[in-house]
Amino acid sequence: MTTAFLFAGQGSQIVGMAKDFYDHCPSSKELMDNLHCDYDIKKLCFKGPQETLNDTAYAQSSIVAASLMILEGLKSKGIKPDVCAGLSLGEYSALCCAGSMDAQTAINIVRQRGILMSNALPQNTTGMRAVLGLDASKILEVCKEVNEKGLVLEVANYNCPGQIVVTGQIEALEMATPMLLEKGARRVLPLSVSGAFHSSLLTPASNQLEEVLKTSSLSLPSIPVYHNVDGKVHEYETIEDLIKILKQQICQSVYFEQTIQNMIKDGVDTFVEIGPGKTLTGFVRKIDRKVNVFTINTMEDVERMLQTWNK
């Protein structure tokens, strides 16, 4: 059995996330109690309000804190991954899992990342939409047509077969929606995000993030981490190589489907989703129904997983 840990990204946040681990796993409680942030991260994770939790500036650090508590719960039972990855923000939890940074460093970075992304673009001028049931080639054709009119429309996420997210200016998204439907998209759904994440519009924010990363204590991963920018494991020569990848990540497409395909090609047969919700589990099942998939939201989920492993 070759196991991958997959860490949830922004949008998965919910009041009470990972509270069960805090209550029932001593190492999870210790981790949360020792995290320092410029807001009460424990209170926000466990008690909300949801409106604040949905704010990009707070959501990112809160999700990573919850994900790392869940990771501690798995580690407490001796469950460790062979490889790991994360969806966008989740890549930081994956790097933490792989030993590239400690929990406090991860929280410090993603708190700044969240603030930078939240402040990067004027409110209500940009956004993202999920395109369901349309091939990537046709979506890219629409992006090209819209771009030729002087607007920004790009692919943000290749999530799984039949689900691709586009990102850009509101005007570009409004223009593209009927074009995508005409080409055969089943639905085009607006996402509840504050801006055009994973687009070239975030290039200034990526430059600012680079400065944050340069002053952070980072190490090279001890196990393979598949990166969002191309769905592959990279051979780093220096920490600067890793920083470059993370800088690129917030202003380029997320190749999650390709990540899972590459993992399977490399022999991964078991996927464990870590973080609130079960979005990534759904993506993996649409990519390949033959692999084993576990969603971990409570310590009871960990116990059920152990029973399956021990059969």
Image (cartoon, rainbow, N blue to C red):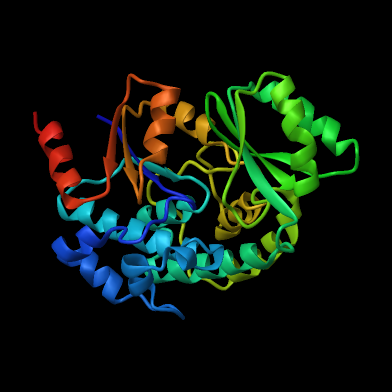
Q: Residue furthest right?
A: 149
* Residue located at (32% from left, 24% from top): 291
Image coords of residue 251 (percent x, y) = 68, 51
Image coords of residue 169 (percent x, y) = 77, 49
* Residue located at (32% from left, 58% from top): 17
For the question of whether residue 169 can be seen, the reply is yes
Image coords of residue 102 (percent x, y) = 38, 66
Quadrant assignment for the N terminus: top left
Q: Residue furthest bottom?
A: 38
Q: In this image, 40 relative to 88: left or right?
A: left
* Residue located at (51% from left, 31% from top): 257
For the question of whether residue 218 can be seen, the reply is no
Q: As displayed, is residue 152 above or below residue 218?
A: above
Count of numbered circles in the view:
0
Quadrant assignment for the C terminus: top left
Q: As displayed, is residue 137 above or below residue 145?
A: above
Quadrant of the rendered structure where residue 254 is?
top right
Quadrant of the rendered structure where residue 307 is?
top left
* Residue located at (41% from left, 59% from top): 63
Q: As displayed, is residue 88 above or below residue 52?
A: above
Image coords of residue 52 (percent x, y) = 48, 68
